[in-house]
Image (spheres, coloured by chain):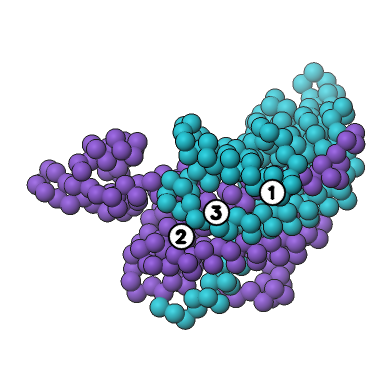
Chain colours: A purple, B cyan
Amino acid sequence: MRIGELSRRTGVSVPTIKFYVREGLLPAGELTSPNQALYGETHMQRLRLIRALLDVGGLSVAAIRDVIVAVDDPEKSVHKVLGVAANRMVPRYEREPDDGIEEARKKVADLVAARGWHAYPDNPAAEALAAALAALEDVGHGSFAEVLDAYADAAERVAGADLEYVARHVAREELVESVVVGTALGDAIFAAMRRLAQVDASNRIFGGAT
Amino acid sequence: MRIGELSRRTGVSVPTIKFYVREGLLPAGELTSPNQALYGETHMQRLRLIRALLDVGGLSVAAIRDVIVAVDDPEKSVHKVLGVAANRMVPRYEREPDDGIEEARKKVADLVAARGWHAYPDNPAAEALAAALAALEDVGHGSFAEVLDAYADAAERVAGADLEYVARHVAREELVESVVVGTALGDAIFAAMRRLAQVDASNRIFGGAT
């Protein structure tokens, strides 16, 4: 199909489609003349994926591109591709270096060791966790750390389910989608479920009380 | 202290402090003359909280205000305040009404019923979950629903820990902080931990393979 039809069928405007091609998110169409390119089902599918990641997953264009490039590289092992995906999908918090972040990093290193998690030393997720823990201390809620073990138990349960899902869909052409779907949409799904379960727990503990 | 000192001690500029007062996030200082107000420890603490919620929690100014107003209302039960907090901290996704969202809403209702979760019918978290599930279907990953039970188990574990934390800090003046810290920073903490646990699970399943 031509770009106009691709735009109509996906609801993505022609300038936006061209932007995605320039940015490396979407493969170029097959040129049939110097001014005309044809697009197929793979473009439709990829466009739907990009929109879902932008709108629901909240990923940046640069993050989506990095993940897609890693998946398209046949030299990269599945484990490496998953590493790139996990790293690019960690929200980054800017924080001035101070004593608080140093102490929080030690806590994270202790937690990772206690859990026996295999993690790279410069894992961005470890840094994001340290920033969140330092912010807790800043607002006088360092004691929230009491519940970290419950969070870690739950994170292991969710990550195990994520990887089982990826393992079932590990044909390479499906890998990018399983990874980004599992990671980006999984965050949204988990956050929403946590709110639902909170209301239920709150009803049990505080329901009816004033 | 005067507003200039409050600014120096918190690193928040004077115009930003005035903006927070106008928007109802921060109580006004005590007027000592028509042009001069005094600020105290509670202002320092509240400013640190606002910054943490904006920077790490990713909440909007409007969301922070609604939560604070609910906590300051002595008529509202703890359960109601938690409900306001949970509702205002759900990311909202815009989605055109279509068959996909209708089907996803049914799935969410089934899940809530199967889990026995007490939830209000128009709970924004249920709608956010439906939008994420509909997005999964759009990108051809409806089968990700296979792992929803694992997510729900983990969400119950985390929500239980959240509420235990709140129950331990339920002195009313501390409630706003426990709730927003537990909810907003908890999301950041859980997302980071999930990435760490994913790398570990990936190493076990795919490590060394190419």
The residue lying toward the viewer, choosing from B72 and B190, is: B190
A80 w.r.t. B61: above or below: below
Kind of element beneath mark 2: helix
Measure the alpha-carbon separation of dots 1 and 3.
Answer: 14 Å
B76 w.r.t. A103: above or below: above
Outermost residue on the left side: it is A33
Q: Position of residue B50 (x, y in %)?
A: 70, 40
Q: Residue sitting at 39 percent across and 67 percent down?
A: A171
Residue B39 falls left or right of residue A71: right
Q: Crowding near pointer 3: few (<14 within 10 Å), some, many (20+)?
A: some
Measure the alpha-carbon separation of dots 2 and 3.
Answer: 12 Å
Q: Of the residues tagged 2 and 1, which is closer to the observer? A: 1
Location of the N terminus of chain B by quadrant is top right
A137 w.r.t. A109: above or below: above
Upstream in the sequence, badge 1 or badge 3? 1
The subunit letter for the residue under badge 1 reads: B
Q: Crowding near pointer 2: few (<14 within 10 Å), some, many (20+)?
A: many
Label 2 sits on residue: A178
Q: Residue sitting at 58 percent across and 52 percent down?
A: A187
Q: Is residue B115 visible?
A: yes
Label 3 sits on residue: B145
Q: Is residue B43 visible?
A: no
Kind of element beneath mark 1: helix
Label 1 sits on residue: B114
Residue A202 falls left or right of residue A46: right
Name which residue type carries label 1.
Ala
Q: Of the residues tagged 1 and 3, which is closer to the observer? A: 1
B87 w.r.t. A115: above or below: above
Measure the alpha-carbon separation of dots 2 and 1.
Answer: 26 Å
The subunit letter for the residue under badge 3 reads: B
Name which residue type carries label 3.
Ala
Q: Position of residue B39 (x, y in %)?
A: 81, 34
